[in-house]
Amino acid sequence: MDMKLTNEKMLTFSGHEKIGAFKAGEKLTEFGEKQNSANEVLAANINDLIKRVCALEDKQLRNEEIMRKIAKELSAAKKEMDRIRLSDKLNSGAIARIDKALHLAEESIDESESE
């Protein structure tokens, strides 16, 4: 049975004609059958929606977990970059001081040789 919801499938009462006493049971049975069919289609659609919502919730939970892991990795990478930058800055300063000391030493040697 096609479970797509349509107005036609949801229409369980189709007439406003007068129903005689002898046809009332037949019309009630017809209405009940149509209502049962409509309920079946609605139930199938609701169950499908529940499955889809659950799948979306599961996907969202997985995505949140992935995002937490990424955030943790990014935080660790930032700390490492900060450490490298500091190390670079300290090393650059140390190299500059050594270079300056070497120039001063060379100047001192040049001055003592020229005397």
Image: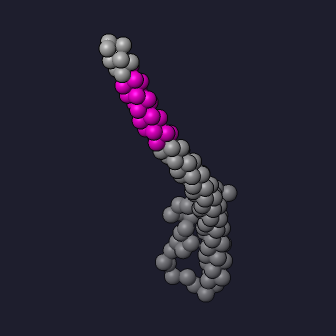
Vertical placement of 80 versus 101: above or below? below
Between 82 and 30, the residue placed more toward the observer is 82
Quick check: can you spot residue 74? no
Quick check: can you spot residue 1? yes
Q: Residue at x 65, y 72 (%)?
A: 36
Res. 20 image quadrant: bottom right
Quarter of the image with the C terminus is top left
Vertical placement of 108 versus 65: above or below? above
Query: Is-magenta flag for residue 51?
Result: no
Res. 102 image quadrant: top left
Between 40 and 66, the residue placed more toward the observer is 66
Query: Is-magenta flag for residue 95?
Result: yes
Q: Residue at x 57, y 52 (%)?
A: 72
Quarter of the image with the N terminus is bottom right
Q: Residue at x 61, y 59 (%)?
A: 61
Magenta range: 84-106
Q: Residue at x 46, y 42 (%)?
A: 86
Q: Main secondary structure of the magenta part?
A: helix
In the displayed structure image, the side of residue 57 where residue 107 appears, left or right: left
The image position of residue 32, as x and y in percent, is 64, 76
In the displayed structure image, the side of residue 109 where residue 84 appears, left or right: right
The image position of residue 77, as x and y in percent, is 53, 44
The image position of residue 23, as x and y in percent, is 62, 81
The image position of residue 83, as x and y in percent, is 51, 44
Tell me which colouring the rendered structure shows. one colour
Vertical placement of 68 versus 12: above or below? above
